[in-house]
Amino acid sequence: MDFIQADSLTYLEQFENISNIVTGIPDMTEINLNEKDYISFLENICSLIFSKTKGYVIFIQTDRKKNGIIDKSYLLTNFAYKHNFKMMWHKIALLRDVGKIDIYRPTYCHILCYSKNLKPGKATPDVIDGGKKSYKNATPSKACQLAIDFVKSMKTRKYGSYDVIDPFSGSGTIPKYCYQVGLTSLGVDLKQPQAFLHSR
């Protein structure tokens, strides 16, 4: 498990081929953008990710409540189709108990898997317990586990040094779990996360 402290977009542009990307793109509140600029930000990131990745792209994303719902699964799927990526599967990870309410965010997150020409793998539950977070906007632990276990099970061709790249690694949940299951991984973020400081 490696970590690069860098701007994610600048760093990804250096790659020609990436095996798999598993990540959660930052929410608009984390980067202080209005809705219109945030959607442009999402599209720019997705264009770069889809143009560089040869295997699977998996996003773990929570929608945003703002004068209605900003539906990230809709947006990301549209961006994927523009790059000839098809949706392999779509899971819902619950972030609250059934029946609970959050006035700011939906109480679930999407786990969205795309590929150009690979297979969706065996059937798994469509709705799961998301698990715990290490902080408010961190990747839910069980959602991370589902995504990484899928990548490991599919045994995709490896390009370069890494099975998985997480270009927005945050607290390091995704690369840390890759390390636990024997996948090579690279986390990229502007700040060094605690998971990398205490992993070895």
Image (spheres, rainbow, N blue to C red):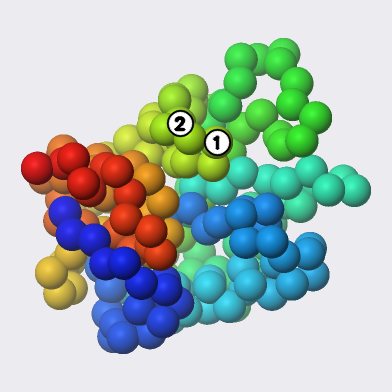
Residue 87's place in the image compared with 53, above or below, is above
Depth order, front residue of 131/188: 188
Query: What percent of the width, then of the height, locates residue 104?
Result: 77, 35
Q: Residue at x 36, y 72 (%)?
A: 6
Quadrant of the image occupied by residue 146: top left
Which quadrant holds the C terminus?
top left
Image quadrant where one finds the N terminus: bottom left
Q: Nearer the viewer, residue 47 or 187?
A: 187
Number of residues whose C-alpha sits closer than 10 Å to that of mark 2, classed few (under 14), some (14–19) or many (20 or more) = some
Q: Position of residue 180 (x, y in %)?
A: 16, 38
Cα gap from disc 1 to disc 2, whole angstroms? 7 Å
State left or right for residue 88 relative to residue 197.
right
Under circle 2, the secondary element is loop
Residue 99's disc number: none
Residue 1 in view, yes or no = yes
Q: Is residue 55 visible?
A: no
The local crowd at label 1, few if under 14, some if 14 to 19, many if 20 or more residues have their Cα within 10 Å, is few
Amino acid type of the residue tagged 1 in the rendering: Lys
- Which numbered circle lies on residue 133? 2
- Drawn side of residue 81 relative to residue 120, left or right: right
Instruction: Count the marks.
Output: 2
4 is higher (above) or lower (below) than 131: below
Answer above or below: position of 61 versus 20: above
SS at badge 1: loop
Please state the horizontal and vertical placement of residue 17, each as a whole percent of the image: 27, 80
The reply to whether the C-beta atoms of the residues labelled 1 and 2 are less than 8 Å apart is yes
What amino acid type is highlighted by mark number 2?
Lys
Q: Who's the residue at 61% across and 15% down the image?
A: 97
Task: Name the residue located 55 percent from the left edge and 36 percent from the top edge.
Answer: 136
**Mark 1 sits on what residue?**
136
On the image, the x and y values in percent for residue 182 come to 11, 45
